[in-house]
Image (cartoon, coloured by chain):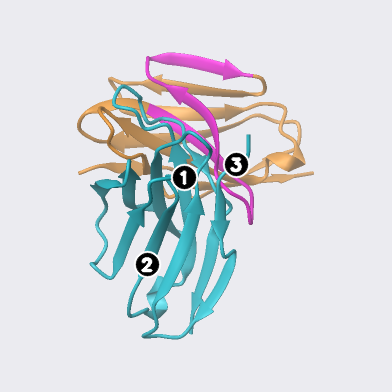
Amino acid sequence: GQSLEQPSEVTAVEGAIVQINCTYQTSGFYGLSWYQQHDGGAPTFLSYNALDGLEETGRFSSFLSRSDSYGYLLLQELQMKDSASYFCAVVSSGNTPLVFGKGTRLSVIA
Amino acid sequence: KAGVTQTPRYLIKTRGQQVTLSCSPISGHRSVSWYQQTPGQGLQFLFEYFSETQRNKGNFPGRFSGRQFSNSRSEMNVSTLELGDSALYLCASRGGGPREVAYEQYFGPGTRLTVT
């Protein structure tokens, strides 16, 4: 089967940096995706890592280590609007569906 | 390009009733997946339809079913509703072709179902 672990809640200060970790166990691993969901909103795609290393997209970066079955999402220069839930999701080979973690609720405080 | 749309947005039903939810994917997308989201449980995969055929199925009881039409619109049905079925039901679409890696999906706003 597949399983993902990520912290349930994280709190950080506006302007700071926060890292949301995700560990996974799966077969047929292809890559790791990250999604953001604001309260009352739909999940939206943030980033995808298929190879080891860091992918940067503006203030957001995502990292993957396939050998450690581990990834993280890094948010820099935190803004109040970054308060949301963040989900990691395992991408498997073929047309198998995304499997999501339970999500990390990020609260950005002043 | 219009996004994924879901109807209705909110629904209140009584235990034992059945419900049908509808999802219209982004134009050109042939894959539609359904997820159930409850507090603390994340997004749990229900099923995926591609070109009118169920391609993948999650671990949900047979009370949950779905179908897809030739225009890629999809419906999911839940029969004999239980209190525990109260959740946000999300659908997501993507191209879904055989060479596509399913890392990015486009989600609709969801249908909030409350069972009383």
Sequence-wise, the earlier of marks 3 and 1 is 3
Residue B42 in view:
no
Residue placed most toward the observer, B70 or B58:
B70
- Image spot of residue A108 (x, y percent): 70, 44
Q: Residue B92 has which mark?
A: 1
Q: Does the magenta stretch include residue B103?
A: no
Asked where in the image residue A22 lies, by quadrant, the reply is top left
Sequence-wise, the earlier of marks 2 and 3 is 3
- Image spot of residue B6 (x, y percent): 55, 56
Circle 1 SS class: strand
Check disc 2 and report the residue beneath it: B77
Sequence-wise, the earlier of marks 2 and 1 is 2
- Image spot of residue B79 (x, y percent): 33, 75
Badge 2 crowding class, 10 Å Cα cut-off, few under 14, some 14 to 19, many 20 or more, is: some
Circle 3 SS class: loop
Q: Is residue A9 above or below residue B30?
A: below
Circle 2 SS class: strand
Tell me the amino acid under the disc marked 1.
Answer: Ala
Tell me the amino acid under the disc marked 2.
Answer: Asn
What segment carries the magenta color?
A32-57
Which one of the lettered chains is coloured orange? Answer: A
Q: In this view, does A21 lie above or below B86?
A: above
Closer to the camera: disc 2 or disc 1?
Answer: 2
Check disc 3 and report the residue beneath it: B3
